[in-house]
């Protein structure tokens, strides 16, 4: 099962991402992207991507309040202290129409 990871918020100043950027995880292990991938972002996603392929985000405490079928994670840059940017990612399954 594929996943789409999309930037929904940037707090502070991120040198890599802007709102709307996205990348895909295909077949459970192939990272496909036209934008650079930040290691802070990747580290935030790694603990969850396999679980989100097979079970709902609510099971892992990651479900959105208004979109429970979508998961939300945040990069690990503590922007208030580093002057960098914290990015919030929305993780969803692609529409199968």
Image: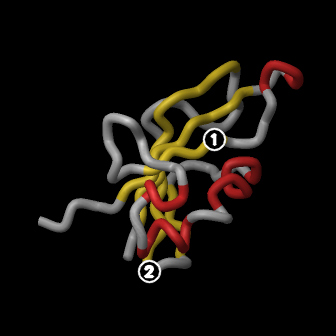
On screen, residue 51 versus residue 14, left or right, reads: left
Residue 14, above or below 33: above
Can you give x and y, in whole percent of width and height, for residue 17 in the image?
A: 59, 36
Disc 2 or 1, which lies upstream in sequence? 2
Residue 10, above or below 1: above
Q: Residue at x 41, y 41 (%)?
A: 64
Which quadrant would residue 26 be assigned to in this image?
A: bottom left
Can you give x and y, in whole percent of width and height, for residue 2 in the image?
A: 39, 71
Q: Quadrant of the C terminus?
A: bottom left
Its colouring scheme is: secondary structure
- Quote the CA–CA distance across marks 2 and 1: 23 Å
Can you give x and y, in whole percent of width and height, for residue 19 in the image?
A: 48, 30
On screen, residue 93 versus residue 28, left or right, reads: left
Q: Residues within 10 Å of mark 1 (few under 14, many from 20)?
A: some
Provide the residue designation for mark 1. Answer: 74
Which quadrant would residue 67 be assigned to in this image?
A: top left
Q: Residue at x 78, y 36 (%)?
A: 77
Of residue 33 and residue 68, the one placed in the foreground of this image is 68
Provide the residue designation for mark 2. Answer: 27
Of residue 49 and residue 68, the one placed in the foreground of this image is 68
Q: Residue at x 44, y 55 (%)?
A: 58
Q: Quadrant of the N terminus?
A: bottom left
Most extreme residue toward the left, as rendered? Answer: 97
């Amino acid at each position: 099962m594929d996943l789409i990871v999309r930037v929904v918020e940037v707090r502070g100043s991120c040198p890599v991402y802007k709102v709307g950027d996205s990348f895909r995880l295909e077949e459970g292990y192939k990272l496909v992207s036209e934008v650079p991938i930040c290691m802070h972002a990747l580290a935030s996603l790694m603990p969850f991507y396999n679980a989100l392929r097979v079970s709902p985000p609510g099971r892992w405490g990651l479900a959105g309040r208004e979109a429970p079928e979508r998961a939300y994670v945040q990069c690990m840059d503590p922007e208030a202290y580093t002057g960098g940017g914290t990015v919030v990612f929305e993780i969803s399954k692609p529409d199968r129409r």
